[in-house]
Amino acid sequence: MSNTRLLPSASSAPTQDKPAGAPRRASMQQIFRAAEHLFGRDGYKGTSMAAIAAAAGLPKANIHYYFGTKEDLYRAVLENILVDWLDDATLWIREDLTPREGLEGYIRAKIAFSRDRPDASRIFAHEVLQGAPHINQFLGTSLRVHVQNLDKTFTAWQRAGLMRPIPSTHLMFCIWSMTQTYADMNAQIVAVLGQPAMEKQDYEDAATTITTLVLGGCQMPSV
């Protein structure tokens, strides 16, 4: 997944024209990657624009040029994370797939996200625990509309007799909580497992377990 799909809004960026092309895209990717890691590790208050610039290997002025303030960058990072999550749902929750294919594919994509980008999940969890002050509007508009659109697929599956008539919104809540815990609560998980870090098989076991629970709860057919 790309970390550069979401660009800063016009209201959060300087008014002068931005350079186009590969150099700008590369810079944006460096900034997002560095900011995601540092915000996830040190939190919003513990992260400075100077630290992000150093981690990205760019002058601090470049960070301000693209985003203006730390708050603008933080909000852009959060929204970029959500855009990537929404893209995964769009890819897998489709009427042309069976519920078994769609739900398993989505669960595995979410587990992969927790494995490969744990800082992203931690940033989002911390933001929500604080009452989502930076992205409340995004959650109530873009995310809400997206989940409503996904409900059309769940409704089609249910009308076709492929899954139980359960509230799709709450099903999504359950999938999010089960998959994101492997990033948000990783310290607890590895402590219980008695190992320094999760291994490849642990993530496979997680994906298989969650898929089994979700498909079983939806009373999916064996075909």
Image (tube, grey):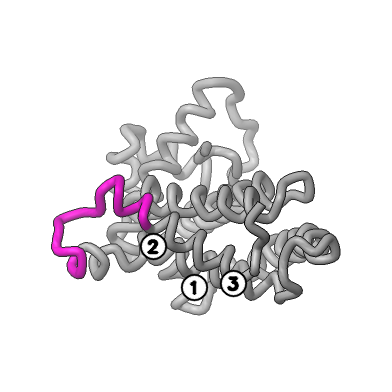
* x, y percent for residue 65: 50, 40
Q: Which residues are magenta?
A: 191-205
For residue 70, side relative to residue 102 (left or right): left
Q: CA distance from mark 1 to mark 3?
A: 27 Å
What is the three-letter code of the residue carrying label 2? Arg
* x, y percent for residue 127: 46, 69
**Is residue 198 located in the magenta-colored stretch of the structure?**
yes
What is the three-letter code of the residue carrying label 3? Gly
What is the three-letter code of the residue carrying label 1? Val
168 is higher (above) or lower (below) than 34: below
Q: Report if the CB atoms under discs 3 and 2 are less than 8 Å apart.
A: no
Q: CA distance from mark 3 to mark 2?
A: 28 Å
For the stretch drawn in magenta, what is the main secondary structure? Answer: helix
56 is higher (above) or lower (below) than 191: above
First along the sequence among labels 3 and 2: 2
Residue to which mark 2 is pinned: 122
Residue to which mark 3 is pinned: 217
First along the sequence among labels 1 and 3: 1
Question: What residue sits 53% from the left and 29% below the top?
Answer: 25
Within-10-Å neighbours for mark 3: few <14, some 14–19, many 20+: few
* x, y percent for residue 34: 36, 43
57 vs 91, nearest the viewer = 91
